[in-house]
Image (spheres, grey):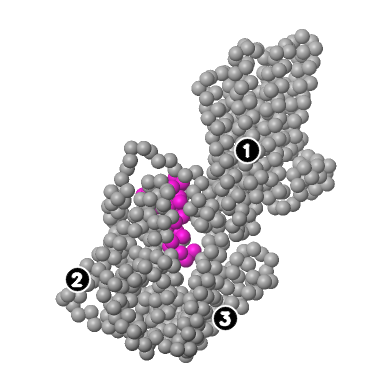
């Protein structure tokens, strides 16, 4: 009895180490892949076959079909990906996840050659651990530290697998265990067990690994392994199904496609294989299965299911639509889907995309508002109001989302992007506010029939062009997180300030000479304030990108040092300032 207790403790310890290693390795792989996952999946899955290849590739990289399918559900719910695009990715993820089984099958290697001994877990795991700990402890590069973490996760996974295999050896002499394995030869029992096990631990790769570990007992036959593997393919859909709760209709249909693909694939296999078994004696079913046999069965089943069902992808979509029918009330997409928080690197990328859309809307609002000062239109005024309201909603959604993201473990690069977004979204929202101020000034011009002099119109045209160019440059730099472009915004803002001062000075002279009215001066002051502050917010966004996001100087300290010539960028600043000053020159006064 005492021996049993210690053996069970060792078995559970090995299982814990195995699951820990798989979790660490998978999350580290996700972090290394970063936000590129979203770009690859959402923008390159234009047809089912492309989506299949990408789903297979991404899943092979991050070692988790569950993570891939949850991401896909989140993309569909956010409107980044269509249901049709999602189908191919889901099919590919089922094949991509088989890579883990092949890695774990290394535990079954036998032989005396140097190569075989090198790749056995007892040798490979310590070797990878040595490399991993060296990179993790002694490297200053975040990328190398990430690779080190992956190596350490792999070591834990393989060591846990080895411990499980050794601790399960006693089971081969246990009659109850042999009887249990025989009961799994019943397809229904085996499929239910495999589905339940995978649903509980929410990882088909982990449940396949446990089955491969059981193979070390020599009691697991092909007859009992095949139904369990089939069930594991059904059980892995639980993660996506749970992730789709509360999502919009198409996102729920995406999870349903995943379930249907696996269930239909299993049904076809069961009917074909066990139907033929009525006429053919599958003698191999009573033979013991090895770890690599599990990998072979798992891979062949998923490849066969994909080959059969890929041409029928349209039917799967139709079936999903039958189970989740269309309702009269349209369902909106989620701007920032919290499901993506499960893969923080992807969530950061999505937040950056939404923030970039917000910046583009603020720029468009300013462009429309400037147009109103020349030719007023109530419809365009409504457009400006709508865009300003939209940026308010973006700011609220982004603020909440980014705070949640800030509590998660991110790479240094993603953390810098997060900081940049957190500090800058309020400045972007303020640009839209100032666009509304310009639009209101335009309304006042229209209502009071204020007429600008030809000279004043020329000066405002130059100033507006300078402000709009600053906003457009800021949006472009923000969208691409381009530091070089961002470095040109502050000298641009300084030129806008100089232009504003010059307009005010010229207005005072015209007012003194009786060429302008006081009423015109009130409207002009509103416009100049909005333009100057818009440029200030552009500068703030650029400084966040250049300094605060990297934890360097505070914004004001940086700007003061830059203008005082105390930084190495100061020379470039002076050169850009002179260039912009010449570009946005006012026409000579009459």
Residue at 69% over, 23% down: 526
Left or right of 552? Residue 473 is: left
Q: Which residue is mark 2?
A: 275
Q: Residue 36 shows which numbered tag?
A: none
Q: Which residue is mark 1?
A: 428
Residue 66 is a magenta residue: yes
Residue at 45% over, 50% down: 75
Secondary structure of the residue carrying numbered label 2: helix
Left or right of 551? Residue 126 is: left
Image quarter of the N terminus = bottom left
* Magenta region: 61-86
Q: Gap in Å between the C-alphas at discs 3 and 1?
A: 51 Å
Nearest the viewer among 82 and 52 is: 82
Left or right of 449? Residue 121 is: left
Secondary structure of the residue carrying numbered label 1: helix
Q: Residue 126 shows which numbered tag?
A: 3
């Amino acid at each position: 009895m005492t021996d049993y207790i210690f053996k069970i403790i060792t078995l559970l310890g090995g299982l814990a180490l195995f699951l820990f290693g798989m979790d660490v390795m998978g999350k580290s792989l996700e972090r290394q892949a970063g936000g590129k996952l979203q770009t690859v999946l959402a923008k390159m899955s234009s047809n089912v076959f492309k989506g299949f290849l990408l789903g297979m590739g991404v899943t092979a990289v991050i070692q988790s079909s569950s993570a891939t399918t949850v991401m896909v559900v989140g993309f569909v719910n956010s409107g980044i990906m269509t249901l049709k695009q999602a189908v191919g990715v889901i099919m590919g993820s089922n094949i991509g996840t088989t890579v883990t089984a092949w890695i774990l099958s290394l535990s079954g290697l036998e032989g005396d050659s140097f190569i075989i001994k090198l790749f056995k877990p007892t040798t490979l795991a310590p070797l990878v651990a040595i490399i991993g700990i060296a990179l993790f402890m002694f490297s200053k590069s975040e990328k190398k530290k990430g690779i080190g973490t992956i190596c350490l996760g792999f070591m834990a996974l393989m060591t846990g697998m080895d411990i499980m295999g050794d601790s399960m050896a006693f089971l081969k002499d246990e009659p109850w265990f042999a009887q249990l394995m025989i009961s799994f030869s019943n397809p229904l029992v085996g499929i239910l067990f495999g589905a339940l096990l995978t649903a509980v631990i929410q990882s088909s790769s982990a449940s396949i690994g446990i089955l491969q570990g059981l193979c070390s007992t020599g009691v697991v036959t092909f007859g009992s392994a095949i139904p369990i593997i089939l069930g594991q393919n059904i059980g892995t859909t639980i993660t996506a199904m749970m992730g789709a709760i509360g999502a919009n209709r198409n996102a729920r249909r995406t999870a349903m496609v995943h379930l249907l693909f696996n269930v239909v694939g299993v049904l076809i296999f069961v009917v074909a294989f066990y139907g033929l078994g009525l006429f053919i004696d599958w003698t191999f079913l009573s033979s013991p299965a090895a770890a690599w046999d599990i990998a072979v069965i798992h891979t062949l089943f998923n490849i066969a299911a994909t080959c059969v069902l890929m041409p029928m992808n349209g039917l799967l979509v139709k079936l999903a639509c039958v189970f989740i029918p269309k309702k009269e009330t349209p369902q909106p997409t989620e701007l920032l889907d919290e499901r993506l928080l499960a893969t923080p690197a992807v969530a950061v990328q999505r937040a950056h995309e939404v923030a970039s859309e917000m910046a583009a809307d603020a720029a468009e609002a300013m462009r429309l508002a400037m147009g109103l000062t020349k030719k007023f239109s109530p419809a365009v005024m409504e457009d400006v109001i709508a865009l300003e309201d939209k940026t308010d909603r973006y700011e609220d959604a982004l603020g909440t989302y980014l705070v949640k993201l800030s509590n998660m473990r991110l790479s240094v690069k993603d953390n810098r992007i997060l900081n940049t977004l957190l500090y800058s979204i309020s400045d972007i929202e303020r640009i839209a506010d100032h666009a509304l101020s310009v639009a209101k000034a335009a309304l006042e011009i229209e209502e009071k029939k204020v007429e600008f002099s030809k000279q004043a119109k020329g000066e405002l045209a130059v100033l507006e062009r300078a402000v709009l160019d600053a906003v457009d440059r800021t949006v472009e730099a923000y969208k691409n997180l381009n530091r070089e472009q961002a470095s040109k915004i502050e000298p641009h803002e300084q030129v806008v300030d100089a232009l504003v001062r010059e307009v005010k000075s010229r207005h005072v002279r015209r007012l003194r000479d009786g060429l302008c009215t006081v009423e015109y001066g009130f409207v002009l002051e509103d416009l100049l304030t909005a333009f100057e502050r818009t440029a200030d917010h552009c500068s703030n966004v650029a400084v966040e990108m250049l300094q605060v996001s990297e934890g360097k100087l505070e914004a004001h300290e940086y700007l003061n040092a830059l203008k005082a010539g105390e930084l190495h960028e100061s020379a470039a600043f002076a050169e850009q300032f002179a260039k912009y000053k010449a570009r946005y020159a006012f026409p000579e006064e009459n």
